[in-house]
Image (cartoon, helix red, strand yellow):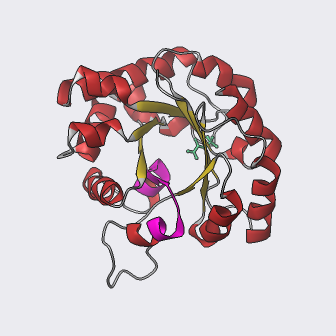
Amino acid sequence: MRKPIIAGNWKMNKTKAEAVSFLQDVKNSVPAADKVDSVVCSPDLFLDALVQEAEGTDVHIAAQNMHFEDNGAFTGETSPAALKDLGVTFVVLGHSERRDMFGETDESVNKKVKAALNHGLTPIVCVGETLDERESDKTNDVVTKQVNGALEGLTEDQVKGIVVAYEPVWAIGTGKTATSEQANDTCSVIRAALANTFSAETADQVRIQYGGSVKPANIQELLGQSDIDGALVGGASLEADSFLKLAEAGD
Ligand code: PEP
């Protein structure tokens, strides 16, 4: 049994006061962490305050990106060591907004995945096709290449600990959700790619989230699919009530 993982990706939203207030509203109401992983992916600025607020609760705090080096002349970047030191436990890597707007590639995602694992952070590795790619029937090839690129050189044990988020780019922030069948089909392709590159036993343990306009009204059906083990949620994770409904759907 793969434990559901529901992650809210706040992107570049909220002030520190709003972030802390959100956490105070949800921290004692999310499902027990042995049943569901409830993750809040915050801008770096609030991570410290959120980790302190979440201490002793069932909420995990995640970063939305990081550099792959431990330190050095990388102005404006955050290191995996610094995230670990704060008490952050998950990190989103290769989100399509970072691939599209900030030059993230499969190669840089691969370096970041390795760095995260070396520092004991759990990577949430995002993959997904554009609308053009889906319409020209390239979805399976695109996600397989992204998964293999991101995980190249990892051991089976390392792969078992990561999370993959399947996020069709055309469904992010657009209100268009992939049908649960479309989402599950592509998550199955991702699991098959993992089985092919690593082993069926490893693929069976990797948690695969769906992301793209998930909301309380559609999460139940998505989570009911055989290869969907959770959700990565942007817009609908910004309000405490809505985040709680999403997390509870995993229970
Ligand atoms: C995301 O930010 O990863 C995402 C899926 O956003 P939204 O839920 O708003 O589509």
Q: How many marks?
A: 0
Can residue 215 be seen here? The reply is: no
Quarter occupied by residue 138: top left
**Residue 103 image position (x, y, % from top left):** 36, 61
Q: Residue at x 53, y 69 (%)?
A: 86
Q: Give the side of residue 124 with respect to residue 6, left or right.
A: left
**Residue 58 image position (x, y, % from top left):** 65, 45
Q: Give the side of residue 6 with respect to residue 15, left or right.
A: left
Q: Residue at x 19, y 30 (%)?
A: 197
Quadrant of picture, ligand 1: top right
Residue 250 on the magenta span: no
**Residue 168 image position (x, y, % from top left):** 48, 34
In this rendering, the answer to whether 207 lies above or below 119 is above
Q: Give the side of residue 199 with respect to residue 85, left or right.
A: left
Q: Residue furthest front?
A: 56
**Residue 180 image position (x, y, % from top left):** 56, 18
Closest to the observer, 178 or 206: 206
Closest to the observer, 175 or 147: 147
Residue 86 on the magenta span: yes
Q: Residue at x 37, y 32 (%)?
A: 133
Can residue 72 be seen here? The reply is: yes
In this rendering, the answer to whether 129 lies above or below 15 is above
Quarter occupied by residue 23: bottom right
Instruction: Name the quarter where the C terminus is drawn.
Output: top right
Residue bounds of the magenta highlight: 83-99
